[in-house]
């Protein structure tokens, strides 16, 4: 005979804060016609059922708690849709790393600069890193100059967080996106005036 096994208790699929599971005595009931009334929970439930609806507790911490007469299936669908849309709007800031060498040519530099602009427009931070190999570390100042140039070229899109730092065989600088910059919009440029410049004062 096999010994008995202890299985965890099954979770009951119980609707909390809906209809008969609402445990408070009194609620502020909201009905589809816009009327709001403070009344006993049992009375609010009967009225909701007479309308062919469920009574859902939507603000349990309010005084008194707020319950709404709705179709519970539609209510759940709308709630999940709102949560899904909210998650889509949330943006997780990432740190995008771009690597350079002290002697990076202009073509590679421009290519990575354009990547950095796109990352900053998306709301991410950019970490530019210059890697030194062998005796290149003796010319660390060249790497720092490259990073300063890179940061200056991104002034319209990002803000530098401190000066370039040398750690081991790498120099790096961190750039954060400009909060007021909106993706799809170009930085404003000073308007050119068609009027001729005034003659110098004599």
Image: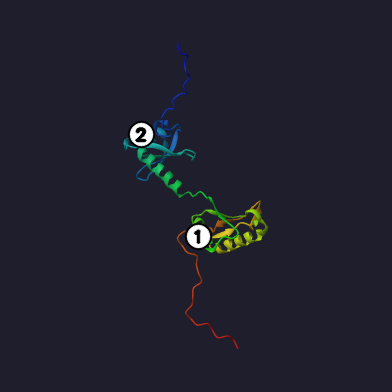
The answer to whether residue 183 is seen in the rendering is yes
Q: Residues within 10 Å of mark 2 (few under 14, many from 20)?
A: some
User: Mark 1 Cα within 10 Å, few/some/many (few <14, many 20+)?
Assistant: few
The mark nearer the N terminus, 1 or 2, is: 2
Asked whether, in this view, residue 197 is left or right of residue 165, the answer is left
Q: Is residue 36 visible?
A: no
Front position in the image: 195 or 65 = 195
Q: Residue at x 36, y 36 (%)?
A: 54
Query: Quadrant location of the N terminus?
Result: top left
Q: Does 17 appear above or below 115? A: above
- Residue 71 appears at what percent x and percent y? 35, 39
- Image coordinates for residue 57, horizontal then vertical, percent: 43, 37
Left or right: residue 63 compared with residue 56: right
Secondary structure of the residue carrying tag 2 is helix
Q: Tell me residue 81's x, y (percent).
A: 40, 44
Q: Residue at x 42, y 44 (%)?
A: 84
Residue on which the image places disc 1:
111
């Amino acid at each position: 005979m096999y010994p008995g096994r202890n299985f965890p208790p099954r979770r009951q699929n119980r609707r909390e804060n809906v209809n008969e599971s609402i445990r408070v005595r009194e609620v502020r009931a909201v009905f589809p016609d816009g009327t709001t009334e403070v009344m006993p929970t049992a009375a609010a439930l009967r009225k909701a059922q007479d309308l062919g609806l469920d009574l859902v507790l939507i603000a349990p911490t309010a005084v008194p708690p707020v319950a709404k007469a709705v179709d519970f299936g539609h209510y759940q669908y709308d709630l999940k849709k709102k949560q899904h849309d909210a998650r889509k709007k949330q943006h997780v800031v990432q740190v995008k790393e771009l690597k350079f060498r002290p002697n990076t040519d202009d073509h590679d530099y421009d290519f990575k600069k354009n990547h950095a602009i796109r990352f900053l427009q998306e709301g991410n931070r950019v970490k530019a890193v210059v890697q030194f190999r062998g005796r290149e570390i003796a010319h660390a100042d060249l790497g720092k100059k490259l990073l300063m140039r890179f940061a200056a070229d991104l002034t319209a899109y990002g803000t530098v967080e401190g000066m370039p730092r040398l750690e081991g065989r790498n120099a790096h600088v961190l750039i954060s996106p400009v909060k007021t910059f909106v993706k799809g919009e170009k930085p404003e440029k000073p308007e050119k005036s068609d009027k001729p410049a005034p003659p110098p004062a004599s």
